[in-house]
Amino acid sequence: MEIRILGAHNVESVNTRLTSVLVDGVLAIDAGALTSSLTFPEQEKLSSILLTHCHYDHVRDIAAIALNCTYVRKTIKVYAQASTLEALLNHILNGVIYPNFTEKPSEKPPLKFFPMELYKAMDVDGYEVIALPEKHAVPAVGYQVTDKDGKSFFYSGDTGPGLSSCWEHISPQLLIIDLTMANGMEEHAIPAGHLTPQLLGEELAQFKNVKGYLPPVVVIHIASLFEKQIREETTQLAKELGTKITIGHEGMKLKV
């Protein structure tokens, strides 16, 4: 299973893109950087999108890729909690900002929505996907994705402390986790539903206690203003835990 990080930040610039990853060229998780990172032929290969929550930096390119799909008469499946899908229809695909691409064009709508149930394994293009609830400013989930060979990873999306409630339900070989703010910013990170290196360390320690092992970790959704400090603090955290923690970046490719 090959994972390509399209966007690893929570802000966009010429050097940074919004959160999104691509699995084997066909399955995306979050949609912050789908059209800005993929060529038209790559977009045509995309079959499904998993959304963790409704915040703009995770759903932005849903409308853009839907518009592109209208020209090649292609339908992409979108999976998320019902509340996330409802927010898309009410605030973006509402006939004002963009058309409701689940209904128009009527002969072949470019989007088809599928509500996800928590804790229930679901087949998505041959991958087993389990959605698990997380603590964020709006309803949000993380996903464990497992391929037909049993290789799996867990993608947290945006999350604050409290991932231990997820650990008993998964056994991934890779963790891709939100790390937005630097240490010393807990008073901002926790209410917003994000992690710092120190908070991440606590979550990883709990993972090891529950599962008896600790897989490699890649962190994304980084706030660029604090990236240098986050790198330094994450390097120290990896030494303390005796595990590999990598700062994600745009274009990074991972093998599971």
Image (cartoon, helix red, strand yellow):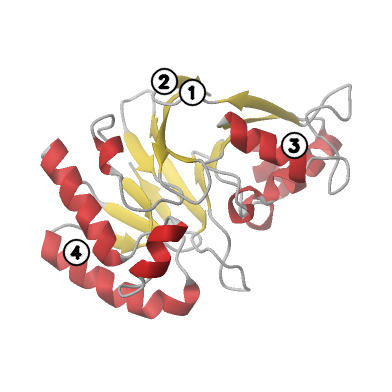
Q: Amino acid at mark 2?
A: Lys
Say which element carries label 2: loop
User: Which of marks 4 and 3 precedes in the sequence?
Assistant: 3
User: Which of marks 2 and 3 precedes in the sequence?
Assistant: 3
User: Which of marks 1 and 3 precedes in the sequence?
Assistant: 3
Q: Position of residue 75 (x, y in %)?
A: 73, 28
Within-10-Å neighbours for mark 2: few <14, some 14–19, many 20+ = few
94 sits to left or right of 213: right
User: Which of marks 4 and 1 precedes in the sequence?
Assistant: 1
Q: Are marks 3 and 2 in contact (CB under 8 Å)?
A: no
Q: Amino acid at mark 1?
A: Glu
Q: Say which of marks 4 and 2 sits in front.
A: 2
Q: How far apart, in angstroms, are the residues tagged by discs 1 and 4?
A: 34 Å
Residue drawn at x 36%, y 40% is: 154
41 sits to left or right of 67: left
Is residue 185 shown above or below 6? Answer: below
Identify the residue under disc 3.
89
Q: How far apart, in angstroms, are the residues tagged by discs 3 and 2?
A: 24 Å
Q: Amino acid at mark 3?
A: Leu
Identify the residue under disc 2.
120
223 sits to left or right of 92: left
Nearest the camera: 186 or 16? 186
Q: Are marks 2 and 1 in contact (CB under 8 Å)?
A: yes
Q: Are marks 1 and 4 in contact (CB under 8 Å)?
A: no
Say which element carries label 4: helix
Identify the residue under disc 1.
117
Say which element carries label 1: loop
Q: How far apart, in angstroms, are the residues tagged by discs 4 and 2?
A: 32 Å
Q: Say which of marks 3 and 4 sits in front.
A: 3
Q: Position of residue 149 (x, y in %)?
A: 33, 25
**Does residue 214 appear in the picture of this structure?**
no
